[in-house]
Image (tube, helix red, strand yellow):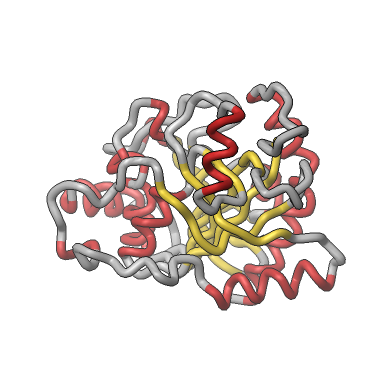
Amino acid sequence: MLKQIEGTANFIKDRITYDPEVGIILGTGLGGLVNEIDINETLSYDDIPDFPVSTVEGHHGRLIFGRLNGKSVVAMQGRFHYYEGYSAEKITFPVRVMKFLGIKHLFVSNASGGVNPDFEIGDLMVINDHINLIPNPLIGKHEKGFGPRFPDMSNVYDSNLISTFKQIAKTHDIKLQEGVYTAVTGPTFETPAEYKYFRIIGSDTVGMSTVPEVIVAHQMGIPVFAISIITDLGVPGKIMEVSHEEVQKVASKAEKKMTLLIKEMMGKL
């Protein structure tokens, strides 16, 4: 796998004009950030050796290279999920490639279902910890070039990045929640009993992505910031039928706030 990643990274390096400092996974709620990037190059996933291809509606499939508020970035427009049939190793392949391209920070966003009764639909939640119920991407043969075999997970989400983000949100009077994200395989949305279970075990929100990428980034020594849009509620008395279209609709309303905050974060790095 190490040789594959090195080969993919070298393929990309031959086609870009600079080394990116920041990696961004443009999950739900950050699609509009593309319009803020001064784009230099784009590469379709289809054209990149060994790269997976996104199959989910609303997720495009290209790497975008450019500058955002003074920082050189590589943005993934379209991420990968376990429920698409990819292995946890394949889901996280692009994060390892971005590390080999030279990124120093990773920013991730997603949509999720809130199980904290204090949350409301449309809230932004800064992720400060997680519970992983997706197969761990580090299972299998260990490559020393990736980092430790048994990474410590006591401080996965960078506290300095969280503090900076909260300060930026405060200056714009943007409400933030903060809490624990639980990652599940999907693709079904949760039953009422499952929502109740997730709350009991310590979740504030639940979704189908992000944690595999974060685990790999942390193993490789990349500081991570992650944020979630609460697109539906799994709280007794507030549970309603959920569709992928409704999730996208709610996320699009929060997009402007997310874009503003992440753009300003770039200038603080």
Residue 204 drawn at (x, y percent):
61, 51
Look at the image and tell me whether residue 66 can be seen.
Answer: no
Specify the farthest residue to the right: 173
Q: Quadrant of the C terminus?
A: bottom right
Position of residue 26 in the picture relative to residue 53 (left or right) = right
Left or right for 121, reference 28: right
Is 66 left, or right, of 251 in this rendering?
Answer: left
Residue name at image x 53 percent, y 33 percent: 194
Residue 103 visible in image: yes
In the image, taking residue 95 as reference, residue 22 lies left or right, namely: right
Quarter location, residue 46: top left
The residue sitting at 35% across, 70% down in the picture is 221
Eyeballing the image, is 82 above or below 70? above
Q: Nearer the viewer, residue 119 or 64?
A: 119
Q: Position of residue 120 (x, y in %)?
A: 78, 45
Q: Residue at x 62, y 41 (%)?
A: 111
Determine the image quadrant of residue 27: top right
